[in-house]
Amino acid sequence: MTREIGRKSVLEVRRSGIVKDKRASGKEQTIMSQGKRALNFNAGPAALPLEVLEQAREEFVDFGGTGMSVMEMSHRSKTYEAIHNETAALVRELLGVPEGYDVLFLQGGASLQFAMVPMNFLPKGKAAGYVLTGSWSEKALKEAQRLGETFVAASTKDGHYRRIPGAEEISFGKDSAYLHVTSNNTIYGTEWASFPDTDPVPLVADMSSDILSRKIDVRQFALIYAGAQKNLGPSGVTLVIVRKDMVERAPEDLPTMLQYRTHAKNNSLYNTPPTFGIYMMGLVLKWVKGQGGVEAVERRNREKAGLIYKVIDDNPDFYLGHAEPTSRSLMNVTFRLPTPELEKEFLDGAKAEGFVGLNGHRSVGGCRASLYNAVPVEHCAALRDYMVEFRKKHA
């Protein structure tokens, strides 16, 4: 059945240039400008909430009557310090970060964290375990291998990364330096539904592509890191949540900027941070709070993913889902069509309808819809409708 907004289908609304957006207040407001915006399913950098972009536009030249953009003001000023501290406080509030953890704003993306984690937490005489569930976990392992002893605690590579390993498949010793997992795999469309109990071994997680998309227990992790460009804001900021005792156990002879200790002791202000990116992250966090918090966002994310997965499940001979059902990602739905020719026609047709970012990763091909927090339900319904119509056309 075609999802309707008023009396028009989503695709008709898209073509007419008018979209109704349900705000946190529960009231529907018609946004004329949104009709000109793409149906954005990019894997990252990804969609940002329209309200956030509009507020940033309003404040771009003059933030809070200062006569300056956030990009122009000193990171040592009281005005910027308030933005910085409020953003950190919102991270703590929305993710339930307990006492005993530092919230850091770093640079270099998750790729730098691939090296910083072992530099700080992989001492000589110990080995770190890596669970391989996709390309990014492979890259994290490769970087750690340059710096110390590692081992593969579990891997689903032989099955083309179609699933997340079960707890019984993960093998590591109690004296391991840490166990590293990638919570969501953007390329293959798999996600950890729950995380292994690794106590007393510290659990480290790359949550770049699903942080803030669902409820997690931060206390289960010794360190969480995430590039901002999926659910937190624009590219350029890396969020790190790290247990204080882990920070203190790191060696002190590392280069200054590569020690978590440096950033923890200086409130992420040792050097000039990515100020505008942190400001934008703060706006996104306020938006999440206005939506009802992480719990409300998770409910909507499950609704969005359900729309697309239902089409795949209803047409298993036509839309060939990559991930096994128990390992499916809420953030990245990956699938193929029966032939390369059909895939090209599907993607070309989607582009003509205004959809952006549905091509699979260049390393695997196929199709991928990234459903990050800021992607509206209406856009997912439009994609669902397009998929149904395309299937009927080729029945």
Image (spheres, rainbow, N blue to C red):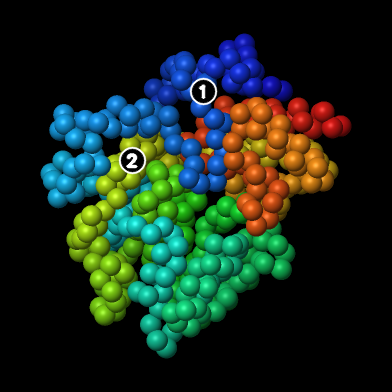
Q: Pick out the residue farthest to the left.
A: 78
Residue at position x 32%, y 65% in the image: 243
Q: Is residue 139 left or right of residue 359?
A: left
Residue beneath the point at 72% across and 64% down: 159
Residue 254 percent location from the top left of the image = 29, 77
Q: Amino acid at mark 1?
A: Lys
Please give the residue where the numbered disc 2 appears in the rendered image.
Answer: 280
Is the residue marked by circle 1 packed among few (<14), some (14-19), or many (20+) residues within 10 Å? Answer: some
Measuring from the top left, give residue 305's x and y in whole percent: 61, 39
Picture quadrant of residue 199: bottom left
Using the rendered image of the protein, determine whether residue 381 is visible from the camera's viewpoint: no
Q: Which mark is residue 231?
A: none
Q: Nearer the viewer, residue 385 or 154?
A: 385
Give the left or right position of residue 232, taking residue 135 as reference: left
Residue at 38%, 31% in the rendered image: 53
Q: Is residue 91 left or right of residue 332?
A: left
Q: Which quadrant would residue 170 be assigned to in this image?
A: bottom right
According to the picture, the residue beneath numbered tag 1 turns out to be 36
Q: CA distance from mark 2 to mark 1?
A: 22 Å
Image quadrant holding the N terminus, namely top right
Vertical order, 37 against 121 (above or below): above
Q: Earlier in the sequence, mark 2 or mark 1?
A: 1
